[in-house]
Image: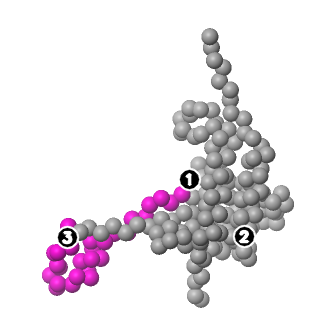
Amino acid sequence: MSVALKKYRPHLPTLMALCDINYMLLLRLLANKEEVGEQRRFFISDFLSYRLVINEVTRYTSLITINQEAVFSVTNKSNKSNKNDKGDDKTQDRQNSQALTLLQPKMVVRLYHDARMAEIISNQDVKQVKPRYDYPNEKMHLPDEKQQINFFLKEWLQLCLQHGQEYISQK
């Protein structure tokens, strides 16, 4: 007796609703930023921030890059008691302390202003995310990878709106 596996089929209404929601959230986060090179940065905590950069603007579309930036500070305590030749504790602390930059997911999103939708163009440098993947596959993408990364983008954007504090540079 053979069991026929049913192939995953994307649920188009759910995917389109996510694209609509992500478009609206991105517009709220971008506020009045409409020129190439403009960016906004949202700090969630001392260790976590999100950066939105406008890469391209045309009449009907915009291309946005969204990066998550997480920085952790690690101190080497084994050499803490050793002083350098001049006895300068601050120099030694700088040498023993390292900032590790980890967890930097990146998405490129195209905003379609006429359709009021946001489409994820690439995720973690994976170009052309397909709506469906056969499973298992060589890169171990989920069958519903496109829908999952749209949910993930929605969570990022909601986090920025609810808890983010924008960094405003002084000119």
The amino acid marked with disc number 1 is Gln
Give, as a single range, the part of the protein colored magenta: 78-105
Q: Position of residue 139 (x, y in %)?
A: 54, 39
Between the residue at mark 1 and the residue at mark 2, the CA separation in whole angstroms equals 24 Å
Whether residue 135 is situated above or below residue 144 in the rendered picture: above
**Relative side of 168 to 24, left or right:** left
Q: Mark 3 or mark 2, which is nearer the start of the sequence?
A: 2
Q: Are marks 1 and 2 in contact (CB under 8 Å)?
A: no
The image quadrant of residue 20 is bottom right
Q: Can you identify the residue that label 1 sits on?
A: 124
Whether residue 105 is situated above or below residue 4 in the rendered picture: below
Quadrant location of the C terminus in the rendered image: bottom right
Q: Can you identify the residue that label 3 sits on?
A: 79
Between the residue at mark 1 and the residue at mark 3, the CA separation in whole angstroms equals 37 Å
Q: Can you identify the residue that label 2 sits on?
A: 28
Q: Mark 2 or mark 1, which is nearer the start of the sequence?
A: 2
Q: Position of residue 62 (x, y in %)?
A: 74, 64
